[in-house]
Amino acid sequence: MLGQNLSAGEQDQLAELLKLDRFQLKMTYWDLPTPAVADVSGEYDAQLLDQGDRFGAFLTRVAFGSKGPWVGKAFRPLSHADGEGYNAFGTVEDRKALLPMDTYIDHSNIVPGNSYILDYRSKNRGPIRWLRGELRQVSANVLLGIGTFGPRARRLHKLRRVIPFVLVRSDREYLGGERVRIPEKRERLAG
């Protein structure tokens, strides 16, 4: 069950998120803080939230299920400014790390300010490159995510599909072991 390891207060927060419609989720996202790269580490259980309409929900579930059942996402900080991650598909006991991503803090395409960004462009081929996720922190163990799928150009933003989801910290390790990298002197923060 999603969130079984959470405190009572965090379980209440999760229950409230699960009740919200897509518009309310975007408004909630607006007010949440951006987590630091170092604060988002390990595997998280995932669940899609309200997709707005039946057809949109069907398309999103088919797309997310194309690699098997979507179990969650995982993250690993590589420096203070960036990290990497993947989506976990399969079952909790037998999961595969697929759809790798770069992670960093940058401007949000959803609301004013910065968000924790999930960028699929450099590590994937095909339409998945049109997917960009963003995270904001509900609590230390719960993240509200909004994915956008479609053209990145601002003038074409109406063609993007907005995909709300929630992530709940699990006790599972990042698949793939440790990776050590010398921190780069690169700033991705928008000015």
Image: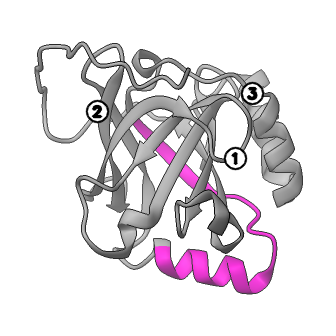
> Marks 2 and 3, how far apart in space?
26 Å
Could you tell me the amino acid type at mark 2? Glu
Q: Is residue 161 visible?
A: no
> Which residue corresponds to mark 3?
32
Query: Does residue 74 lie above or below 122 as drawn?
Result: above
Could you tell me the amino acid type at mark 1? Ile
Number of the front mark, 2 or 1: 1
Number of the front mark, 2 or 3: 3
Which of marks 1 and 2 precedes in the sequence?
A: 1
Which of marks 3 and 1 precedes in the sequence?
A: 3
Q: Is mark 1 on a helix, strand or loop?
A: loop
Q: Where is residue 172 in the image (x, y as percent from the top left)?
A: 34, 35
Q: Where is residue 140 in the image (x, y as percent from the top left)?
A: 60, 19
Q: Residue at x 50, y 46 (%)?
A: 45
> Which residue corresponds to mark 2?
173
Q: Residue at x 45, y 75 (%)?
A: 65
Q: Which residue is drawn at 69% across and 47% down?
A: 110
Which of marks 3 and 2 precedes in the sequence?
A: 3
Q: Which residue is drawn at 69% across and 77% down?
A: 57
